[in-house]
Image (cartoon, rainbow, N blue to C red):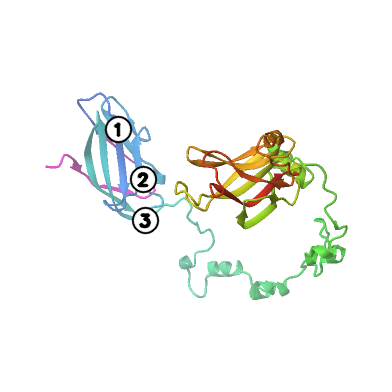
Amino acid sequence: MPNYTTYNIKMVKGDTESFGFEVTGIDSLDTAFFSCKRNSQDTNYLFQKSLGAGITQSTESHYIVRIAPEDTQSLAPGQYWYDLDIGKDGDIFTILRGVLELVPKITEPDAVVFTSVDWGNIVGNIQNQSDLQAALNAKATTSSLAQVATTGSYDDLTDTPSIPTKTSELTNDSDYVVESNLAAVATSGSYSDLLNRPTTLTDLTGVLPINQGGTNATDVVSARTNLEVYKEYVLYNNSSGSNGTINLSDSVTNYVKLGIYFRTLNPSSSDFTSNVYSYQEIYISTLSDFYFLLSIVRSNHELYLNFCSAIAKLELSSFVLFNNRSFYIEVQGSNRGPDSYQIYVTRVVGYKY
């Protein structure tokens, strides 16, 4: 058995409708809803009343539901679905359910009231219809109408305003500029039509600091110096390599450091891989008097380049000093021999800012 009562409500659309219900055994409700839909399965409400907003508590157990005129004013006459739910302590009960039937309203606040003669109510006979004559006298005759009343044409109006046909007849209160007063570039968009064009960028002055993404310099060398970026210069290049005197194209004193590409070869022993290319750098500031000997030293089964100062060179056999544009290659360490641990320099580069 359903726990609700079926009750159909019939009311005039746009009227006020109210009814009460009583709930016993509890002090007061937590929730109460009176909801109306066009169809019972619709998801949207036509209107809804809730506790404190359309549903009021008159006494401890009595409640009144009020349907206001604006709730049904815009609805068409017909049948709609409604229910009344109440809630207490998390429980929900539908206590009333049924059809809300709206019937048409006769008295409308905005209805038109006819104050002139109602033609359907003219009485009298054809010989004596003074009320008909009075009604006709109240009507305007065609001859009394202006011509525009029947044509609807603007040309039939009288006292028409004068409408300007030229912009020069208007007041230029917006300060519009005529085309003849514009510069050529305004319509061409061409750079060549600009006046006072810069010819070079020699007007640029100042430097951009490094902390702002610049070089803090006005020339290339200063920029590389500030950024500590070296430029590489080739001083010697020989793809086959040389193990004799290496003549450079410039003095090493003009550079911060040298980079030497070389390969080693031990034709009499299999301890080392032949033709292995290596690279080594040396800073010029570590060489004494810039007269030095390029030698090769064996240590822990590896070969290293060793640079000796002029003083050290005097202690090595009877070698003579070379100028600062030449290298001399000598084998140092154990197992010295004419064919042991040969070093071939293939490329020498200098680095400076």
For marks 2 and 1, give the one nearer the viewer. Answer: 1
Point 77% across, 64% down: residue = 189
Q: Is residue 14 above or below residue 29?
A: below
Mark 1 sits on what residue? 31
Q: Are marks 2 and 1 in contact (CB under 8 Å)?
A: no
Q: Position of residue 313 (x, y in %)?
A: 68, 37
Q: Position of residue 107 (x, y in %)?
A: 42, 52
Can residue 291 be seen here? The reply is yes
Q: CA distance from mark 2 to mark 3?
A: 14 Å
297, 166: nearer the viewer? 297
Say whether disc 1 or disc 3 marks the residue closer to the N-terminus: 1
The label on residue 47 is: 2
Q: Are marks 2 and 3 in contact (CB under 8 Å)?
A: no
Q: Is residue 77 shown left or right of residue 120?
A: left
Q: Is residue 13 above or below residue 93?
A: below
Q: Position of residue 45 (x, y in %)?
A: 34, 47
Q: CA distance from mark 1 to mark 3?
A: 30 Å
Report the span colored magenta: 1-20
Can residue 169 be seen here? The reply is no
Q: Secondary structure at mark 2?
A: strand
